[in-house]
Image (cartoon, rainbow, N blue to C red):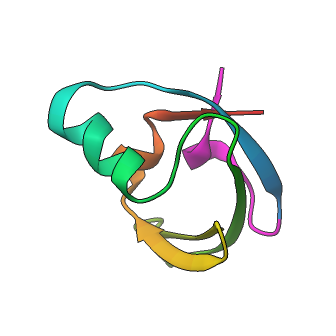
Amino acid sequence: MVTLRNVKVGQTVQVTRLNGEGALRRRIMDMGITKGTTVYVRKVAPLGDPVEITVRGYELSIRKGDAECIEVQ
């Protein structure tokens, strides 16, 4: 299982599954990250948190904990 947290800078991946439940899952989906969405990892902060991604044409920063809930391929 590969999560968005493990993806290297400059890679483009596709979301295969969202883990987590309730408010966390809803928040991730509200940001436009859903199954089948293509995500490009732009950069990672020096201490690894947050991760800056491009999804659906806009830039977004998410925490490592949230990125751990997003399975990709």
Magenta residue span: 1-10
Position in image of residue 72 (x %, y %): 68, 35
- Give the camera-side residue of 64 and 69: 69
Residue at image x 48%, y 74%?
60
Left or right: where 13 falls relative to 34 = right
Q: Is residue 3 magenta?
A: yes
User: How many marks on residues?
Assistant: 0
Residue 55, compared with residue 45, is above or below; it is above
Left or right: where 55 falls relative to 25 = right
* Residue furthest to the right: 11
Query: For residue 73, which quarter of the picture?
Result: top right
Position in image of residue 34 (x %, y %): 54, 41
* Residue furthest to the top: 1
Residue at image x 66%, y 20%?
1
* Residue furthest to the left: 23
Query: For residue 4, which quarter of the picture?
Result: top right
Position in image of residue 52 (x %, y %): 54, 73
Residue 41, compared with residue 69, is above or below; it is below
Residue at image x 36%, y 59%?
63
Residue 63, compared with residue 58, is above or below; it is above
Q: Is residue 41 magenta?
A: no
Residue at image x 70%, y 37%?
36
Left or right: where 39 falls relative to 19 = right
Left or right: where 26 falls relative to 53 = left
